[in-house]
Image: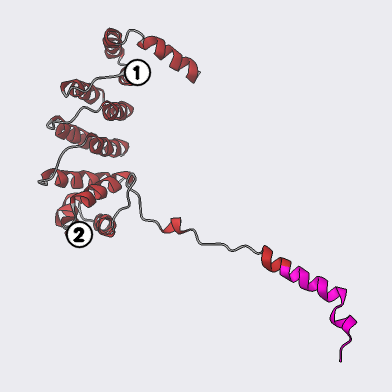
Amino acid sequence: MLSSSLAFSPHRLATSTAAVRRSTSSTITMRDRGKNRKPMQRGRYLSTEAIQAVQSLKRATLSGAPAGSAVATDPKLRRLLKADMVAVFRELAAQGEAHLALKVFEEIRKEHWYKPRLFWYVDLITVLARKGLRSEVGKACSYLKREQLEPDTDGFNLLLKTLLDAEFTQLTMDCFRLMKLWDTEPDRTTYITLVKGLESLGEMDLSAKMRLEAESDYGALWDFFDEEETTET
């Protein structure tokens, strides 16, 4: 029989206490489920059907099919509901799939439920411009000119900046006129975007014209403009 002094030896007690401490201090790590989340579309998840349509269209073009025929014949795209079809278009634009995004957008415009949204055009023109597809940018702007949209100053400001960054001077001025035609009031940001952008492109006469127009609408605009330049410096 073991003696009581051996059974309760300080060494065994210390070892047991250390084991308990190691056990209680161990941390449990959980897998980050965020890594498995579906692609996002500005505050919403893509449905399974939308994801499958995006993947199907990309596979078709990788196998050599033109974007137009891939979109026209894809059965998964044809079965989508309105929200999913728009989500597919915006996801393709976000992924830089410019030709596919354009063709899907053209299909959306044929749908009976279609109601134009300026931010769709901003998404489309942005990806087309980034890919250097100048004729396609012109085509998208020609579609825009046929629409009748609700006033949206912020949306037009984004569109004007996108066109100026891609050096589309004439389309920029066309869209500025369209902006006023649709009763969208230019604000300070509109004029500052135009003046700076046109100057950067060497369009000094147009820039000066925008300055004069801005001064007639905003007497204190250039005080604000000077403050902005000082802040940047």
Residue 2 painted magenta: yes
- The picture quadrant where one finds residue 19 is bottom right
- The amino acid beneath tag 1 is Ile
Question: Does 91 sit left or right of 144 as displayed?
Answer: right
Residue annotated with mark 1: 192
Q: Observer-nearest residue: 202 or 21?
A: 21
Q: Position of residue 69 (x, y in %)?
A: 16, 53
Whether residue 202 is situated above or below residue 141 in the rendered picture: above
The circle on residue 4 is: none
Q: What stretch is highlighted in magenta?
A: 1-20
Q: Where is residue 3 in the image (x, y as percent from the top left)?
A: 89, 86
Residue at 26%, 35% (x, y): give it: 122
Q: Observer-nearest residue: 137 or 191?
A: 191
Q: Is the magenta region chiefly helix, strand or loop? A: helix
Whether residue 14 is situated above or below residue 220 in the rendered picture: below
* Real-space Cα separation, disc 1 to disc 2, in angstroms: 44 Å
Earlier along the polypeptide chain: callout 1 or callout 2? 2
Q: Where is residue 42 in the image (x, y as percent from the top left)?
A: 33, 44
Extreme residue toward the front, this view: 4
The circle on residue 76 is: 2
